[in-house]
Image: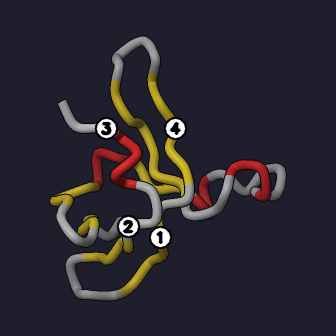
Amino acid sequence: MNSISILYNKPIIDLNGKRIGVVKGLVLDMELGSISHLLLKDPKEMPRGEFKKYSIEFSKVKSIGETIIVRSN
């Protein structure tokens, strides 16, 4: 079983190779037992009301390796 901690500080890029940021936090869906979002900013430092700006839905993740590749919108 893999630990979710391996995702922290991994670079995130889109399918075009554009660097989006790095993983600074995760949002877990406790009912489903899965990750719902990757956070681009430490949750403690995230401005109120800016969740969408600093998060990526985990369903957009295409692959995880040295980097995390995500679909654009």
Residue depth check, mark 3 versus mark 4: number of the one nearer the observer: 3
Given the image, on which type of amino acid does mark 2 rest? Lys
Report x, y in % for residue 21. Answer: 48, 75
In the figure, is residue 49 to the left or right of 68?
right
In the figure, is residue 65 to the left or right of 12?
left
Question: Mark 4 and mark 2 in contact (Cβ < 8 Å)?
Answer: no
Residue depth check, mark 2 versus mark 4: number of the one nearer the observer: 2
Q: Where 15 falls versus 62 (above or below)?
A: below
- For the point 75% across and 56% down, the residue is 46
Given the image, on which type of amino acid does mark 4 rest? Val
Report x, y in % for residue 5. Answer: 40, 45
In the figure, is residue 6 to the left or right of 55?
left
Q: Where 61 falls versus 34 (above or below)?
A: below
- For the point 36% across and 65% down, the residue is 73
Query: Label 3 crowding class (10 Å Cα cut-off): few <14, some 14-19, many 20+?
Result: few
Find disc 3 in the rendering and name its residue. Answer: 3
Find disc 2 in the rendering and name its residue. Answer: 10
Q: What element carries label 4?
A: strand
Chain-order first, disc 2 or disc 4? 2
Mark 2 and mark 1: Cα distance apart in space? 5 Å
Report x, y in % for residue 55. Answer: 53, 56
Query: Label 2 crowding class (10 Å Cα cut-off): few <14, some 14-19, many 20+?
Result: some
Q: Where 33 falls versus 23 (above or below)?
A: above
Question: Mark 4 and mark 3 in contact (Cβ < 8 Å)?
Answer: no
Find disc 1 in the rendering and name its residue. Answer: 22
